Image (cartoon, rainbow, N blue to C red):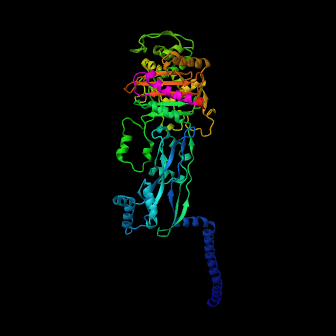
Amino acid sequence: MTRSASPQRDAQRHSGLRQQPLVLFGLVLLFCSAMVARLVWLQVLEGPRYRQLADENRIRLVPRSPTRGRLLDRKGRVLASSKLTYSLYVEPRLVDDAAWPELRDRLSSLMDLNPMTLDRRRQSGPDRNGYRINLASELSSEQVLRFREQSLGLKGAQVDVDILRAYPYGTLAAHTLGYTQPITEEEYTALADRGYKIRDRIGRIGVEAAYESHLRGKWGGQMLEVNAMGEVQRHLGDRPSVAGKDLTLTLDLDLQKTAEQALADKPGGAIVAMDPRNGAILALASNPNFDPNFFSKLVTTQKEYDALFSNPKKPLLSRAMNAYDPGSTWKPVTAMAGMASGKFPPEVKLNTTSCITYGGHCFPDHNGAGFGRIGYADALRFSSNTFFYQVGVGSGSLALKKAATQLGFGRKTGIEIGWEENVGLVGDEEWAKEGRGWAEPGSTPWIPEDMASASIGQSVVQITPLQLARAYSVFANGGWLVTPHLADQGLDWTAPSRRTKVPIKPSTLAKIREGLRKVVEDGTGYGLNGEGIPPAAGKTGTAEDSTGGPDHAWFASYAPYPNGEIVVVAFAQNTPGGGSVHALPMAKKVIEVWNRNRKQN
């Protein structure tokens, strides 16, 4: 058995020895194939990506901000531009702690800079890219010239250009134009993928924010070659930034100046001038206002910030888009509701008296006697309260709310800067039933006194000057609700998506227009007449301030009559004395300038 098994084992052993070279060859071939495949993947398939990563490790880009696009008025006049300011930088990778004192002293002597300030700026640490520290800003021409004359001996220091926003007219149209500010950490995190840098400035409010992507441009910078230690070896050149695009606004500089001058002596207020045919905003003024150049300053103290942001006059609040009691300028809305309800047709006549009792209160007419038996046109002409009490209470809150909604109240107007816009309030019985926004549902029912107040634009009605201008555009243009806008953008603003037909009967529209014309012909708005004023229509308003302050003064108007080409709403906040005394003269100044310019063109 032993001898017979031995030849079999020998045969197996020799067979295994013959297979070993094949196994080793296979293993070698497998490893070589893996290495070749890996090299092909690295060099051929992923080569471009790794070359890019290598370049990025070798080349650093010191960002250079783009020039922001200008804001122009409708005639091409500059409302916002950019200014160049020179800043002194040090490149920390080229200047170590040992070399810094000598450089600091030379810079201090050459450019008349405080050495302690230079030390403090340098010690505050490099910016996010780690290649430049700002030592001084807003250098004078003389400082820049001195530096450039000695720049070869100032290794590691650099004077470069910063681009800041500039508003040549200061406070003019500040709420409308807006301003720019440095980007925040949170914004940078969200916007870095879109090309924003930590040193970026971003539109904060107004047109600057609404058209940020149009205006901002693209960053460029200075390319530096660095070694593996991150030390700068040489400058490779510049990658030019791409300037932002200019934006032509619908604003008219002449009308904007006139509106702001008219508001100057009022404690607060707003003026809106708009083309009722397409919604183009010609002027949008608010007082008090602020200087947007404040936000372009590179250094601002906390005291300066507090003086603006904690100011009790609230200069940052746009009165043109904040809601207030409209008073008698609301009466055309009540007239529309009355005629639409069918209960008070266009030719109705009602007896007006000294006052009418609703609930436990006698609501008076403003003259203390009434105006006899009159219709809609004379009720608007005389601004009779007791006429519109009867129409409003008789029609009901839901009818009034429906008319108001059709005229654009109770919602945003669609203007590009609408995030700053208050939607206002048009109270009705459903709103009261739900708690009026502050009480438990069912605890604050709608009462007759509410309806009487709502009929003449008091207490439970609050609207913005911009909303009122949009509503009066419906009367001026023959029944179209337009979308207010500040830039045409090459769009058709009379297209159905931007201008809609209001379901108002021709007879209703004609009666309201007749009444608004009578107001100016020989009613409370008679003061609008004069040389340089085309035939116009409008409505005065004196409104009690539901927050407890002095009365507001209003005037809403359009010209020429009957088919308006401009709507002007003037609002004087907490300025007692009446709309005909305070608000009408403001609107008149704007219409005069508009008419004069129209004749010259």
Give the residue drawn at x 43%, y 46%. Answer: 295
**For residue 476, what is the image quadrant?**
top right
Is 2 in front, or is 500? Answer: 500
Where is residue 523 shown, x and y percent of the image? 50, 16
Which percent across, then down, holds residue 139? 43, 55
Q: Which residues are magenta?
A: 572-597
Residue 498 to residue 15: above or below: above
Between 582 and 305, the residue placed more toward the observer is: 582
* Quadrant where the N terminus is found in the figure: bottom right
Q: Quadrant of residue 312?
A: top left
- Against 128, is 310 above or below? above
Q: Residue at x 47, y 10 (%)?
A: 371
Q: Quadrant of the C terminus?
A: top right
In the visual, does 581 lie left or right of 517?
left
Give x and y (percent) for residue 32: 62, 76
> Does the image show residue 427?
no
Q: Relative to the observer, which residue lies in front, 374 or 563?
A: 563
Q: Is residue 578 magenta?
A: yes
Determine the main secondary structure of the stretch shown in magenta. helix
